Image (cartoon, grey):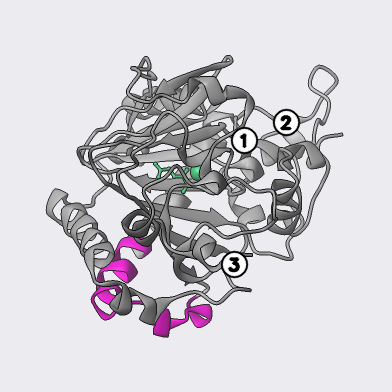
């Protein structure tokens, strides 16, 4: 494979002024990837996390919104989550500054060919893969003993630790609330999550793209997670969700966290909650920075539909699976929806 293909997009852009073949999107929705076209905005419910732990009737209303968001569009905007505005802005600033460093500086954190962790462009899993217009810094955060701190820029260490520790608390609160919203025991999802659960931070950087009508920031996919927490760029939109066969833009709420269900939550909830297919469109004028934190059950743990959600009217639609992340990448590589492999 030619050397230039594995360059960060940021570098490719400096040396190449022609539409790069490996990045041209050829999917079915290819005729409709934007290029400045306006997409309708998705109606995403706001869920007040403060109310989720209150003993009031207001809590019931938040449960209802949580359930409705996850079962219709597969996501919601978490507000009143306890993270200060300034703290989120600082997290964004640290990420943005990293990608603005000279290449030699960033390359100190480069991933190796056979590893996803570290700094680099879209992982090339197959020769036929269309590449995403994005550079990333990908870091395993939990279990803590698996951190490769040599890949963490020094100024990330304190803040990323603090940010993800808060997300871990939020994740637990949400898993309990989601179970309660379905009238289940509050540990129904949590106990499948396990003690050695995995948390991965992915800093996504989307450089401006001169061909926004031909190239995507991230191809359509659903996350292989239980839950994903996304800190969106404060100003530049780009994320879109597929709902009833149409693409909708996800609105920016600067200090909210966008939470979406992943495939493993769809499996555990026996399809009550949807893992939404989503993509990122590019922008010819402005760069975009986001931070996705992926929460995944312990690798070796078997996960499957919660028993109380299976009955005659609603038979089990998903198998019990183990190592879903491996299933995910095997299928993703072949352009298949990984979740189909877990369907009965
Ligand atoms: C992802 C993702 C969306 C975004 O990293 O899986 O979907 O807006 N990111 O960066
Ligand atoms: Ni995603």
- Neighbor class of circle 2 (other Cα within 10 Å; few <14, some 14-19, many 20+) is some
Q: Nearer the viewer, mark 3 or mark 1?
A: 3
Q: Residue at x 42, y 45 (%)?
A: 18
Measure how far apart labels 1 and 2 are at the Cα level.
Answer: 9 Å
User: Considering the numbered disc 2 on the image, is that residue within a helix, a strand or a loop?
Assistant: helix
Q: Residue at x 57, y 23 (%)?
A: 29
Question: Residue 91 sits in which quadrant?
Answer: bottom left
Which badge, 3 or 1, is on the more N-terminal residue? 1
The residue that disc 1 covers is 184
Q: The residue tagged with tag 1: helix, strand or loop?
A: loop
Decide if ligand 1 comes within 8 Å of the CB at mark 3: no
Q: Magenta region, mostly helix, strand or loop?
A: helix
Q: Quadrant of residue 107?
A: bottom left
Q: Say which quadrant the C terminus sits in.
A: top right
Q: Which residues are magenta?
A: 144-164
Q: Which residue is mark 2?
A: 309
Q: Which residue is mark 3?
A: 195
Q: Position of residue 195 (x, y in %)?
A: 59, 67
């Amino acid at each position: 494979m030619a050397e230039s293909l594995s360059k960060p997009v940021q570098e490719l852009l400096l040396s190449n002024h022609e539409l790069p073949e490996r990045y041209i999107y050829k999917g079915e929705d290819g005729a409709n990837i934007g290029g400045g076209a306006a997409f309708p905005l998705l109606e995403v419910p706001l869920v007040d996390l403060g109310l989720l732990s209150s003993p009031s009737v207001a809590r019931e209303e938040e449960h209802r919104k949580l359930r409705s968001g996850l079962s219709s569009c597969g996501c919601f905007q978490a507000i009143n989550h306890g993270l200060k505005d300034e703290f989120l802005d600082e997290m964004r600033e640290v990420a943005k500054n990293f990608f603005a460093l000279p290449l030699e500086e960033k390359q100190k954190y480069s991933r190796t060919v056979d590893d996803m962790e570290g700094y680099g462009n879209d992982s090339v899993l197959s020769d036929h893969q269309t590449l995403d217009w994005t550079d990333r810094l990908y870091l395993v955060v939990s279990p803590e003993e698996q951190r490769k701190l040599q890949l963490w820029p020094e100024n990330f260490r304190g803040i990323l630790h603090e940010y993800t520790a808060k997300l871990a608390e939020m994740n637990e609160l949400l898993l309990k609330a989601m179970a309660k919203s379905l009238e289940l025991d509050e540990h129904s999802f949590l106990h499948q999550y396990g003690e050695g659960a995995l948390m991965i931070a992915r800093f996504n950087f989307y450089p401006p793209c001169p061909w926004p009508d031909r190239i995507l920031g991230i191809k359509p996919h659903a996350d292989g997670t239980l839950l994903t927490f996304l800190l969106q760029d404060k100003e530049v939109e780009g994320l879109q969700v597929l709902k009833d066969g149409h693409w909708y833009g996800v609105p920016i709420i600067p200090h909210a966290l966008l939470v979406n269900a992943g495939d493993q939550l769809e499996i555990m909830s026996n399809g009550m909650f949807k893992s939404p297919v989503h993509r990122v469109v590019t922008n010819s004028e402005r760069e975009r920075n986001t931070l996705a934190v992926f929460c995944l059950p312990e690798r070796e743990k078997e996960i499957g539909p919660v028993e109380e959600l299976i009955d005659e009217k609603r038979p089990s639609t998903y198998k019990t699976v183990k190592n879903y992340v491996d299933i995910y990448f095997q299928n993703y590589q072949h352009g298949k929806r990984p979740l189909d492999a877990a369907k009965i």
